[in-house]
Image (cartoon, rainbow, N blue to C red):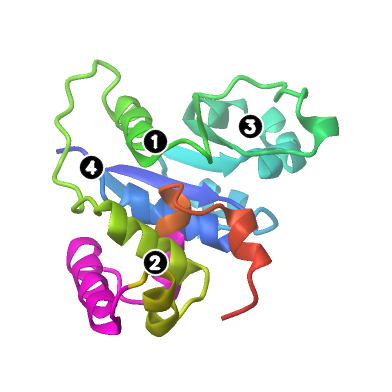
Amino acid sequence: MKISGFILIIDSYLVRKGLISLLNRIQGIRVLKEFGASDPFMTYLDTHPVDFIVISQSAFRRRSDLFISNPELLEKTVLLEEPLPEDQNSEKPIQEVQASIHIMENKETLIAKIEGLLDPGGHRISGNRAGELSPRETTIVRLVSMGLTNRQIAEQLFLSAHTVMTHRKNIISKLGIKSVSGLTIYAIVNNIITLDEVSSFPAK
Protein backbone atom coordinates (compact mmCIF):
# COMPACT_ATOMS: atom_id res chain seq x y z
CA MET A 1 0.00 0.00 0.00
CA LYS A 2 1.26 3.45 -0.90
CA ILE A 3 1.85 5.69 2.11
CA SER A 4 0.86 9.33 1.63
CA GLY A 5 2.86 11.90 3.58
CA PHE A 6 0.94 14.76 5.21
CA ILE A 7 2.14 17.93 6.90
CA LEU A 8 -0.10 20.18 8.99
CA ILE A 9 0.10 23.97 9.19
CA ILE A 10 -2.38 25.00 11.88
CA ASP A 11 -2.17 27.66 14.60
CA SER A 12 -4.09 25.84 17.32
CA TYR A 13 -2.08 23.14 19.10
CA LEU A 14 -5.28 21.31 20.12
CA VAL A 15 -6.66 21.30 16.59
CA ARG A 16 -3.32 20.08 15.21
CA LYS A 17 -3.14 17.22 17.70
CA GLY A 18 -6.77 16.35 17.17
CA LEU A 19 -6.36 16.18 13.41
CA ILE A 20 -3.20 14.10 13.77
CA SER A 21 -5.18 11.69 15.96
CA LEU A 22 -7.81 11.46 13.21
CA LEU A 23 -5.28 10.99 10.40
CA ASN A 24 -3.51 8.25 12.34
CA ARG A 25 -6.73 6.23 12.23
CA ILE A 26 -6.63 6.08 8.42
CA GLN A 27 -4.54 3.41 6.72
CA GLY A 28 -2.02 4.68 4.20
CA ILE A 29 -1.30 8.01 5.90
CA ARG A 30 1.83 9.18 7.65
CA VAL A 31 1.98 12.59 9.34
CA LEU A 32 5.47 13.81 8.52
CA LYS A 33 5.56 17.13 10.36
CA GLU A 34 3.36 19.68 12.09
CA PHE A 35 3.80 23.45 12.08
CA GLY A 36 2.23 26.51 13.60
CA ALA A 37 1.29 29.12 11.01
CA SER A 38 4.33 31.25 11.85
CA ASP A 39 6.81 28.36 11.62
CA PRO A 40 9.19 28.21 8.61
CA PHE A 41 7.42 25.34 6.86
CA MET A 42 8.72 26.31 3.41
CA THR A 43 12.21 25.21 4.44
CA TYR A 44 10.83 21.76 5.11
CA LEU A 45 8.89 21.67 1.84
CA ASP A 46 12.01 22.64 -0.10
CA THR A 47 13.87 19.59 1.18
CA HIS A 48 11.20 16.95 1.82
CA PRO A 49 8.64 15.47 -0.57
CA VAL A 50 5.06 15.59 0.73
CA ASP A 51 1.78 14.45 -0.79
CA PHE A 52 -0.66 16.70 1.06
CA ILE A 53 -0.52 19.94 3.02
CA VAL A 54 -3.38 20.53 5.48
CA ILE A 55 -3.45 24.24 6.32
CA SER A 56 -5.96 26.20 8.37
CA GLN A 57 -7.94 28.89 6.61
CA SER A 58 -6.46 31.67 8.76
CA ALA A 59 -2.91 30.46 8.13
CA PHE A 60 -3.61 30.19 4.40
CA ARG A 61 -4.78 33.80 4.30
CA ARG A 62 -1.73 35.08 6.15
CA ARG A 63 0.75 33.05 4.10
CA SER A 64 -1.01 33.23 0.73
CA ASP A 65 2.02 34.92 -0.83
CA LEU A 66 3.94 31.65 -0.51
CA PHE A 67 1.26 29.82 -2.46
CA ILE A 68 1.12 32.54 -5.12
CA SER A 69 4.85 32.18 -5.69
CA ASN A 70 4.66 28.36 -5.50
CA PRO A 71 1.40 27.47 -7.31
CA GLU A 72 2.36 23.80 -7.52
CA LEU A 73 1.70 23.59 -3.77
CA LEU A 74 -1.99 24.32 -4.37
CA GLU A 75 -2.38 20.89 -5.99
CA LYS A 76 -1.36 19.34 -2.66
CA THR A 77 -3.25 21.71 -0.37
CA VAL A 78 -6.23 20.74 1.77
CA LEU A 79 -7.81 23.82 3.31
CA LEU A 80 -9.08 23.41 6.87
CA GLU A 81 -11.99 25.82 6.97
CA GLU A 82 -12.87 27.38 10.31
CA PRO A 83 -15.30 29.92 11.74
CA LEU A 84 -14.00 33.40 10.96
CA PRO A 85 -14.95 36.89 12.18
CA GLU A 86 -18.09 38.20 10.46
CA ASP A 87 -16.15 40.67 8.33
CA GLN A 88 -14.13 37.80 6.84
CA ASN A 89 -16.84 35.16 6.40
CA SER A 90 -17.70 36.27 2.87
CA GLU A 91 -14.08 36.20 1.72
CA LYS A 92 -12.88 33.19 -0.25
CA PRO A 93 -9.29 32.15 -0.93
CA ILE A 94 -8.18 33.62 -4.24
CA GLN A 95 -6.43 30.39 -5.16
CA GLU A 96 -8.06 27.07 -5.93
CA VAL A 97 -6.88 24.35 -3.57
CA GLN A 98 -7.03 20.57 -4.03
CA ALA A 99 -9.79 20.10 -1.43
CA SER A 100 -11.30 21.57 1.70
CA ILE A 101 -12.56 20.18 4.99
CA HIS A 102 -14.34 21.99 7.80
CA ILE A 103 -13.26 21.99 11.42
CA MET A 104 -16.89 21.44 12.55
CA GLU A 105 -17.58 18.42 10.33
CA ASN A 106 -18.05 15.11 12.14
CA LYS A 107 -15.25 12.57 12.11
CA GLU A 108 -16.97 10.25 9.62
CA THR A 109 -17.26 13.08 7.07
CA LEU A 110 -13.67 14.15 7.62
CA ILE A 111 -12.38 10.60 7.24
CA ALA A 112 -14.45 10.06 4.09
CA LYS A 113 -13.12 13.26 2.51
CA ILE A 114 -9.52 12.42 3.35
CA GLU A 115 -9.89 8.85 2.11
CA GLY A 116 -11.33 10.31 -1.09
CA LEU A 117 -8.08 12.23 -1.59
CA LEU A 118 -6.07 9.04 -1.20
CA ASP A 119 -8.27 7.16 -3.66
CA PRO A 120 -10.17 9.53 -5.99
CA GLY A 121 -11.75 6.49 -7.69
CA GLY A 122 -13.54 5.61 -4.47
CA HIS A 123 -12.31 2.01 -4.24
CA ARG A 124 -10.44 2.36 -0.98
CA ILE A 125 -11.43 0.03 1.87
CA SER A 126 -11.31 1.65 5.28
CA GLY A 127 -9.20 0.13 8.00
CA ASN A 128 -10.42 -0.70 11.47
CA ARG A 129 -11.17 2.34 13.57
CA ALA A 130 -11.36 2.89 17.29
CA GLY A 131 -14.45 1.59 19.03
CA GLU A 132 -17.44 3.86 19.16
CA LEU A 133 -18.42 5.35 22.50
CA SER A 134 -21.83 4.83 24.03
CA PRO A 135 -23.96 7.94 24.73
CA ARG A 136 -23.06 7.73 28.44
CA GLU A 137 -19.34 7.44 27.65
CA THR A 138 -19.62 10.39 25.28
CA THR A 139 -21.18 12.46 28.05
CA ILE A 140 -18.38 11.50 30.41
CA VAL A 141 -15.73 12.44 27.85
CA ARG A 142 -17.38 15.85 27.53
CA LEU A 143 -17.42 16.35 31.32
CA VAL A 144 -13.79 15.24 31.61
CA SER A 145 -12.92 17.80 28.92
CA MET A 146 -14.67 20.43 31.05
CA GLY A 147 -12.26 19.62 33.87
CA LEU A 148 -14.62 17.72 36.19
CA THR A 149 -13.25 15.06 38.51
CA ASN A 150 -14.69 11.54 38.72
CA ARG A 151 -16.52 12.53 41.89
CA GLN A 152 -18.00 15.65 40.30
CA ILE A 153 -19.09 13.64 37.24
CA ALA A 154 -20.71 11.06 39.51
CA GLU A 155 -22.67 13.76 41.34
CA GLN A 156 -23.80 15.45 38.12
CA LEU A 157 -24.93 12.20 36.48
CA PHE A 158 -26.33 10.65 39.68
CA LEU A 159 -23.92 7.73 39.45
CA SER A 160 -21.52 6.18 41.91
CA ALA A 161 -17.85 7.11 41.65
CA HIS A 162 -17.14 3.43 41.00
CA THR A 163 -19.48 3.45 37.97
CA VAL A 164 -17.77 6.54 36.58
CA MET A 165 -14.37 4.88 37.00
CA THR A 166 -15.69 1.82 35.15
CA HIS A 167 -16.85 4.04 32.30
CA ARG A 168 -13.45 5.74 32.24
CA LYS A 169 -11.72 2.36 31.97
CA ASN A 170 -14.01 1.40 29.09
CA ILE A 171 -13.24 4.69 27.34
CA ILE A 172 -9.51 4.08 27.70
CA SER A 173 -9.96 0.54 26.38
CA LYS A 174 -11.89 1.76 23.32
CA LEU A 175 -9.83 4.85 22.48
CA GLY A 176 -6.41 4.07 23.92
CA ILE A 177 -6.38 7.57 25.47
CA LYS A 178 -5.57 7.93 29.16
CA SER A 179 -4.81 11.63 29.70
CA VAL A 180 -7.33 14.44 30.17
CA SER A 181 -5.61 16.47 27.44
CA GLY A 182 -5.86 13.52 25.05
CA LEU A 183 -9.56 13.07 25.77
CA THR A 184 -10.09 16.81 25.29
CA ILE A 185 -8.47 16.63 21.86
CA TYR A 186 -10.63 13.62 21.00
CA ALA A 187 -13.74 15.49 22.15
CA ILE A 188 -12.92 18.50 19.97
CA VAL A 189 -12.21 16.43 16.86
CA ASN A 190 -15.42 14.46 17.30
CA ASN A 191 -17.61 17.51 17.99
CA ILE A 192 -18.36 16.43 21.56
CA ILE A 193 -17.20 19.83 22.73
CA THR A 194 -16.09 22.93 20.85
CA LEU A 195 -12.69 24.59 21.01
CA ASP A 196 -14.37 27.79 22.24
CA GLU A 197 -16.02 25.87 25.07
CA VAL A 198 -12.71 24.33 26.12
CA SER A 199 -11.03 27.74 26.05
CA SER A 200 -13.74 29.17 28.32
CA PHE A 201 -13.13 26.66 31.11
CA PRO A 202 -10.60 27.42 33.85
CA ALA A 203 -7.20 25.85 33.31
CA LYS A 204 -7.06 22.31 34.62
Seen as rendered, the residue at the extreme top is 121
- Of the two numbered discs 4 and 1 in the rendering, the one whose residue sits closer to the viewer: 1
Mark 3 near mark 1, Cβ–Cβ under 8 Å?
no
Taking depth in this image into account, of 92 and 133 the one nearest to the observer is 133
Taking depth in this image into account, of 76 and 151 the one nearest to the observer is 151
Q: Report the magenta residues as a range.
A: 159-185
Horizontal relation, residue 161 to residue 166: left or right:
right
**Residue in the image at 53% along x and 55% along y:** 15
What residue is pinned by disc 2? 183
The quarter in which the C terminus is drawn is: bottom right
Mark 2 near mark 1, Cβ–Cβ under 8 Å?
no
Of labels 4 and 1, earlier in sequence is 4
Q: CA distance from mark 4 to mark 1?
A: 15 Å
- Of the two numbered discs 2 and 4 in the rendering, the one whose residue sits closer to the viewer: 2
Mark 1: which secondary structure?
Answer: helix
**Residue in the image at 62% along x and 78% along y:** 203
Q: CA distance from mark 4 to mark 3?
A: 26 Å
167 in magenta:
yes
Mark 2 near mark 3, Cβ–Cβ under 8 Å?
no
The amino acid sitting under disc 3 is: Asn
Of labels 2 and 1, earlier in sequence is 1
- Of the two numbered discs 3 and 1 in the rendering, the one whose residue sits closer to the viewer: 1
What residue is pinned by disc 4? 28
